[in-house]
Image: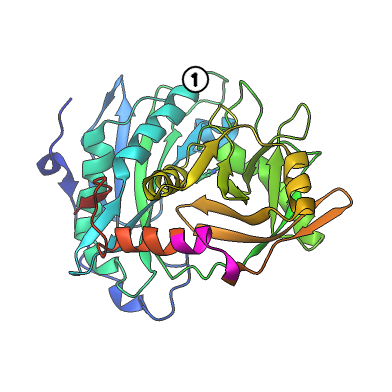
Amino acid sequence: MAISTLDIKINQTTNSRIQQLDQANIQFGKLYADHMLVAHYEHGEWKQPEILPFGNLSLSPATTFFHYGQAIFEGVKAYKDVHGNPVIFRPFDNWKRMNRSAERMAMPDVPEEIFVEGMRALVNIDRQWVPSTEGTSLYIRPFMVATDEFVGVKPAEKFMFMIITSPAGPYYAKPVSIFVQDKFVRAFPGGIGFTKAAGNYGASMYPTMKIKEMGYDQILWTDGFTHKLVQEIGTMNVFFVIGDTVITPELSDTILAGVTRDSVLTVLREKGVKVEERQLSIDEIVAAHEAGTLKEAFGTGTAASIAPISDLTYQDKHMVLPPVEQWKTANWLKQELGDIRCGRKADVHHWLFKV
Ligand SMILES: *Cc1c(COP(=O)(O)O)cnc(C)c1O
């Protein structure tokens, strides 16, 4: 099914809220841009997508996703390039990942024409909402939910795909204090850890609340069998620099294939840095820390880009990392990715999608 941008129905607002956007003081997730995109799936096909003023929905209380959580999402960002034009970072990768999540959750594929072209049209109509100061962006949230009006348990037949956007300020990543989780589990083989399913987030709220009460910022998740193999931190992929090697857990059905993770691996390999994607045990991290070879540890994700880790607590071991200012890899990565996103560096991988 081919849907060109022309086939998106546009109902433009006559009442823009753009004057509410204070570029010098952006509070993430407080303010949404003027428009949203909605597409409905029914009788085995996607209907014409519509861009309309951002606003509330009206849904039956029997709507399936309220009860059984057939709900998935994505997170993408648009930036202003050096010429002031909005560019979207690697939207095709998010589109492919959305459809991997959709398959696992028994939801329909979202066509590229709706996901990518719909996103382009939405960012275009709200281009004034893409902030232009250093480090800011427009956060783009595509999502899909099951919308059958039926409380019986079965895969739904009706779905709704939407995209909303929200300006995001510069992310001053204060290094995070990590609790190595050896009781609760985020993802297990055969499960949905590799998807951006809403339920993964719901399930992580309680363990996260508990470690916050103890004074930590985020959880380093470990595997459910041995509680030794590290997976991710919070909702970010995780990297460790041991000696001169950058190590991240290899992809599997318990690891979310982050677009930032892939970007980091790509630019590091290009620079000739030794990188390894493999199983990594917490014992190896403890041993490296004791030997003085644990140099850096950081999370990666669209929201924070690169999030440095200040310390890790595993059982009775408290491991403090060297001060972030001394780190080579994470600081270089942050700069490099920032330069690529804003067009200060050549976009050799065609990661920037012009709006
Ligand atoms: C979204 C997400 C990430 C980061 O993915 P990016 O594509 O880099 O934003 C990592 N882990 C989990 C669990 C996630 O949901």
Find residue 224 and report its horizontal and vertical position in percent. 74, 30
Looking at the image, residue 237 lies above or below residue 12: above
Residue 68 inside the magenta-drawn segment: no
Residue 138 drawn at (x, y percent): 35, 61
Residue most extreme to the right: 316
Specify the quadrant that holds the N terminus: top left
Task: Specify the farthest residue to the left.
Answer: 6
Quadrant in the picture for the C terminus: bottom left
Residue in the foreground of this view, choosing between 201 and 264: 264
Q: Is residue 233 above or below residue 324?
A: above
Seen from the viewer's position, the closer of residues 134 and 321 is: 321
Q: What residue is at 63 percent from the left and 65 percent from the top?
A: 175
Colour scheme shown? rainbow
Report helix, strand or loop for mark 1.
Answer: loop
- How many residues crowd around disc 1 within 10 Å: few (fewer than 14), some, or many (20 or more)? some
Q: How far across and down, in percent of the image, does residue 233 sit?
A: 63, 48
Q: From the viewer's perspective, is 71 left or right of 13?
A: right
Badge count: 1
Residue highlighted by disc 1: 155
Residue visible at 26% across and 65% down? 344
Main secondary-structure element of the magenta-colored stretch: helix
On screen, residue 198 versus residue 136, left or right, reads: right
The residues colored magenta run 326-332
**Image point (69%, 42%), residue name:** 221
Q: What amino acid is at disc 1?
A: Pro
